[in-house]
Image (spheres, rainbow, N blue to C red):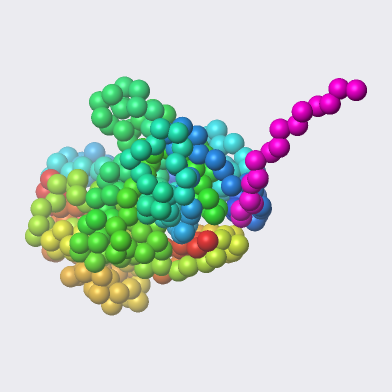
Amino acid sequence: MVVGADFAPIQVTPVQLINGSKTIQGWASGTPADSEDTVRFAELTGVRPMVETYPLEKAGEAYARMLSGKAQFRVVLTM
Amino acid sequence: MATMRVTPLPEVAPMKAAQISKPGADFEIVEREIPEPAAGEVRVKVQACGVCHSDMLTKEGAWPGIQYPRVPGHEVAGIVDKLGAGVSEWKKGQRVGVGWHGGHDGTCRECRRGDFGNCRNLKIPGISYDGGYQQYMVAPVEALVAIPESLSDVEAAPLLCAGITTYNALRHSGALPGDLVAVQGIGGLGHLGIQFANKFGYQVAAIGRGSEDATLAKKLGASVYIDSQSTNAAQALQQLGGAKVILATAPSSKAMSELIDGLGPNG
């Protein structure tokens, strides 16, 4: 299932998919009700994001940090 | 001499916002008037907003039809601050979030089928209207998400895009408890995908680049770590029986293409 957005084509031959009846599927996020399921599941199970926080005034720096791919792992602005 | 009757402007306190003034421009911190919610909308006092890779759509103008200046941000956690006319199901002071799904029209063919996520006129915060990189934002009620007490704002915000995407993809993937599920990429999405996959009861294989993420991946719930730089990850998955699902989170079509042969039968 593909959730990481890239604009380049994924390369696959028909034979790769036919042998074993394989599927490539994309997935968008979901509805607000799905988000509520997500946060409730996180509450229930202890799943938490690892975050780096930046103040709103440093939005540019925060964005650059996200783009660098080096953040551990989600960058979050605080107000 | 006729006197003009001047209606006094309502007093508006300014707030701070980080906006993009045109495609490709840098962020600028500006003062704006605090927005007023229209009917069917609420104003949210933003407490935290995640920075998502797809904010580049607004930053670089890669999404058609964006009107600038625009405030990005679709991982918003905050507090209901003011209700627009007709809003009764949310209360002032209630903790809420706003994610990628920022509103639907309720009238298109997809909405009439209940498929709101595929609304023909889906609104996205930070793209269709100003998002969460500001102190106050306005959102339609159908976009709101109730946030449980035990989650902080900073923890909740990334769950509203990175979290829901991995959680929702995995729970609709058809994988059953015990199945081998690979999570490719140990980053913003992947580190959540590993945790969800573990909690769903899968055997989790984390696929990263280099050896340094192995310890973390196992701590997050992976039972196997595959370093795609030193090993052929598709072969490694086949040695484990083949993956029922590979959740491809790193935005690299090349890496995804190389993993397809790691899928097991009916994967």
* One can see residue B123 in this view: no
Above-or-below relation of B87 to B17 = above
Residue at the (71%, 33%) spot, across then down? B7
Left/right placement of residue B36 relative to residue B22 reads left
Above-or-below relation of A25 to B154 = above
**Image coordinates for residue B175, horizontal then vertical, percent:** 14, 51
Going by the picture, which residue comes out furthest to the right? B1
**Residue B9: quarter of image:** top right
**Could you say which is closer to the camera, residue A26 or residue B138?**
B138
Left/right placement of residue B16 relative to residue B196 reads right
* One can see residue B121 in this view: yes
Residue at the (47%, 49%) spot, across then down? B81
Left/right placement of residue A73 relative to residue B163 reads right
- Name the dominant secondary structure of the magenta segment: loop
Q: Is residue B37 magenta?
A: no
Q: Is residue B3 magenta?
A: yes
**Image coordinates for residue B199, horizontal then vertical, percent:** 17, 62
**Image coordinates for residue B234, horizontal then vertical, percent:** 23, 59
**Could you say which is closer to the camera, residue B76 or residue A14?**
B76
- Residue bounds of the magenta highlight: B1-16
